[in-house]
Image (spheres, grey):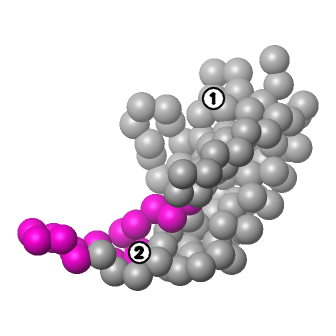
Amino acid sequence: MGWRVTVRSGPRVVKLRAASLDEALDLVEREARVLAAGPRRAAVDLRMRSFTPQQQVAGRVELAGPRLSAGVDVRGDGAAEAWTGRLRRRVVAQEERESPYDALRRVLRQ
């Protein structure tokens, strides 16, 4: 079956495929770093609420494979946050001196 990597940035959606989990994780990291290096978001003020760049998801890189769903959200300020789960996303806690990409690799290889 293989692994699917979906990159979402605004209305743009790109679908990629990988043969192995390691190759798919490399694709996730590469695409998320490209999104993080992109333009930053400004704060959004609505009538009842405002959203800071840290609260906005500027881009998402999703990884889907055999009985697995995970990915990385890139925030409006360029920060990245790894998550797992399909319906209920759970943020992957980073250990000391660990990037979100390393944390995702650690959790998926367990």
In the image, 58: left or right of 107?
Answer: left
Q: Residues within 10 Å of mark 1 (few under 14, many from 20)?
A: few
Residue 5: horizontal and vertical position, in percent? 72, 40
Q: Give the residue number, with chain letter if any, for mark 1.
A: 68
Determine if the magenta segment contains residue 43. no
Residue type highlighted by circle 1:
Leu
Residue 50 point in image, percent of width and height? 22, 74
Magenta residue span: 45-60
| 87 over 56 or under it: above or below | above
Q: Residue at x 58, y 57 (%)?
A: 9
- The answer to whether residue 104 is seen in the rendering is yes
Residue that protrudes farthest toward the left in the picture? 48
Q: Position of residue 109 (x, y in %)?
A: 74, 40
Is 106 in front, or is 18? 18
The quadrant the C terminus occupies is top right
In the displayed structure, would residue 86 be above or below residue 40?
above
The one nearer the camera, 78 or 94, is: 78
Tell me what residue is drawn at x 36 percent, y 69 percent.
55
Q: Is residue 19 left or right of residue 84?
A: right
Q: Residue furthest front?
A: 11
Within 10 angstroms of label 2, few (less than 14), some, or many (20 or more) residues?
some
Mark number for residue 54? 2
Q: Residue at x 73, y 68 (%)?
A: 34
